Image (cartoon, rainbow, N blue to C red):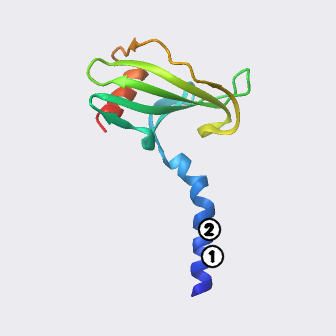
Amino acid sequence: MKKILSIFFLVTCISYPILSKENDYKKIFGSEKEGYFFISLSSIQTKQGTSFFTYLHNLPNKNKFGDLSYLTSIEAECKSYKYRVLGSQWYSQNFGKGILNVEYSNKSEWQIAEKKTFSRKFIDYSCNK
């Protein structure tokens, strides 16, 4: 019995970090043509009408730089739908895995998320979570 529990514990410890990253994401929208967009559930923090979150875009094919995914951190105002990018990281594999090819950490200017845009869908999800 101890041996079985030890094996179960070991398998769980090894597989959890591998599986947990993909399980942290909820698909918001996308297609095979444009790729799929996800929000990181553990990244969502909403306080006093402002939401912080990270979204993931799995690209359908590698871009010219060899990237297959990127993560983008966002700050958004829930009522006005204003948002800005806080930073992004581009990876060689899906789900932000593989080699980190480039990282940007400059805050963008504030923008308005228009209706029926992917930005608006992310803000709606994060502010209502």
Name the residue tied to disc 2.
Answer: 11
Which residue is at the front of the view, 31 or 15? Answer: 15
Q: How many marks?
A: 2
Q: What residue type is labelled 1?
A: Ile
Which residue is at the front of the view, 58 or 12? Answer: 12
Asked which quadrant contains residue 13, the reply is bottom right
The percent position of residue 63, horizontal first and vertical second, equals 69, 23
> Label 1, label 2: how many angstroms apart (C-alpha)?
6 Å
The residue at 55%/47% (across/down) is 21
Asked which quadrant contains residue 105, the reply is top right
Asked which quadrant contains residue 97, the reply is top right
Q: What element carries label 1?
A: helix
How packed mark 1 is, by other alpha carbons closer than 10 Å (few <14, some 14-19, many 20 or more), is few
The percent position of residue 11, horizontal first and vertical second, equals 62, 68
Image quadrant where one finds the N terminus: bottom right
Label number found at residue 7: 1
Which residue is at the front of the view, 103 or 22? Answer: 103
29 w.r.t. 19: above or below: above
The residue at 37%/16% (across/down) is 113
Q: Is disc 1 in contact with disc 2, using a CB cutoff of under 8 Å?
A: yes
99 w.r.t. 114: above or below: below
Q: Left of 85 or right of it: where is 121? A: left
The percent position of residue 53, horizontal first and vertical second, equals 43, 33
Q: Left of 104 or right of it: where is 42? A: left
Q: Left of 129 or right of it: where is 61? A: right
Q: Is mark 2 on a helix, strand or loop?
A: helix
Q: Which amino acid does label 2 sit on?
A: Val
The residue at 61%/37% (across/down) is 96
62 w.r.t. 21: above or below: above
How packed mark 2 is, by other alpha carbons closer than 10 Å (few <14, some 14-19, many 20 or more), is few
